[in-house]
Amino acid sequence: MSEFDLVIKNGIIVNEEKLSKADVLIKDGKIVDIGLHIKETKAKQIIDAEGLYLFPGIIDSHVHFNEPGRSEWEGLETGSKSLAAGGATLFFDMPLNSHPPTTSEQAFHLKNGLAKEKSVIDYRLWGGVVPGNLDELEKLLQCGVIGFKAFMSNSGIDDFQSADDRTLLQAMKKIAELHSILAVHAESDTITEFLGKEINRESDHIALAFSNARPIFSEIEAVQRIIAYAEATKCRLHIVHISSADVLEPILAAKRRGLDISVETCPHYLSLTMDDLEKLGAAAKCAPPLRSKQEVDNLWEAIRKGEIDVIGSDHSPSLPSMKMGNLLEAWGGISGCQTTLSVLLEEGYWQRGIPLEMISKITSTNPARRFGLYPNKGSILKGYDADIAIVDVNEKFILKKEDLYYKNKISPYIGKTYRGRVKATISRGELIYSHFSDSNKMTT
Ligand SMILES: [Zn+2]
């Protein structure tokens, strides 16, 4: 009879292939056994998860926590606590909009030291590709970056310049040699700049005008170009935040040709539309912009078919003052890292019958696989890190501002009703978030 640190009894485990009811036994941060009615267990802490689902902890491969340099926008502590409350146990922080951006070894060490001190969950950092930092890429990889990120259009921030075509090609050649991966924000700089100047600033439908100035074909043009560069350099690619299933076509064709490429979309493209942007204003402003209801539905159909690899929140907060005034001038970025699972359960599982196993796969297993952390992360299996979100998929709630752990509690999801709530989050065996109202659920 051995003593465990934590036992989660009677929950239904949601792995990518199947649902199974079992007890999960945890010791020293690891899942040491999984089975039904394991007898004679002694544990320091027991959670009765009868009627609840156990998802592998969400891996959010796309957040902007802005620390150091702009930590008044978010911060590593508030950001990671928000994620924990949403069932996430690992995040990858983007190289911008922290200052300095993570484009050099020195900047990496600065952010990494802060993350080590402040994050309540596991993390990795993305390195940045900007004009002139080619010599830093190898050093950044040696430091431990999860991959590299480049912008093909204006990033909206002066200290992270978009990568011109020559920079992209040179960096991709280097990244291929290093066996790493490039994530790209794929919108055409030329098209978005050109159409941006054409916007009728007096329009009564400024949200529509904004969306039309960053059209789907601008994403497609950039994706086609970066795929051609991947053909030329053999660089592995990850296309972030596509806003439309139309953008998938060149990506799927490239996959069929054998290119090593993956694709992400975000909860906001799976739940919000231009009408929300019109109604909510800058809280729902992002780039690429929100599209139509049809585009939302099309993206869900792509998920059903297994064509989307990864869901990242692209949590990109700012100061409230930057979200005021004219929509065209306001900061583009949506705060949503705490609500990923609730949005996917409501919009996917409840409204469209997307299987829970698929939600588990695109939020955890696939990112773990894509970024080299599988096995060990991304599933609830014996020997893996004990990273688990305990979820009541039936619990209905209205998201309130005060529920959010964000530093600046602005989010387009406030006031919306969701079915599916994270009840507890376990990171490497430790209970780091709990929303159980029933004290019987937990015994120590
Ligand atoms: Zn982003």
Image (cartoon, grey):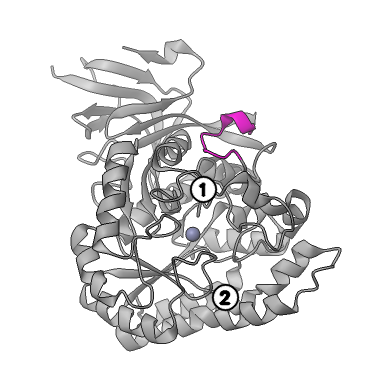
278 versus 116 height, above or below: below
* 297 lies left or right of 23: right
Q: How many marks?
A: 2
Q: Residues within 10 Å of mark 2 (few under 14, many from 20)?
A: many
* 182 lies left or right of 210: left
Disc 1/disc 2 C-alpha distance (Å):
29 Å
* The residue positioned farthest toward the right in the image shown: 204
Which amino acid, by three-letter code, is at mark 1?
Pro
Q: Quadrant of residue 210?
A: bottom right
Q: Quadrant of residue 362?
A: bottom left
At 55% from the left and 46% from the top, the residue drawn is 336
Which numbered marker is on residue 355? 1
Q: Earlier in the sequence, mark 1 or mark 2?
A: 2
Query: Looking at this view, is 214 or 242 the one in front?
Result: 214
Ligand 1: does it lie within 8 Å of the C-beta at label 2? no
Which amino acid, by three-letter code, is at mark 2?
Glu
- In the rendered image, is residue 372 in sight? no
The x, y position of residue 92, in whole percent, is 36, 53
Query: Looking at this view, is 367 or 117 the one in front?
Result: 117
Residue at the disc numbered 2? 219
Question: Bounds of the magenta span?
Answer: 399-409
Query: Looking at this view, is 277 or 95 the one in front?
Result: 95
* The residue positioned farthest toward the left in the image shown: 1
The x, y position of residue 86, in whole percent, is 48, 37
The x, y position of residue 56, in whole percent, is 37, 41
At 59% from the left and 64% from the top, the residue drawn is 287
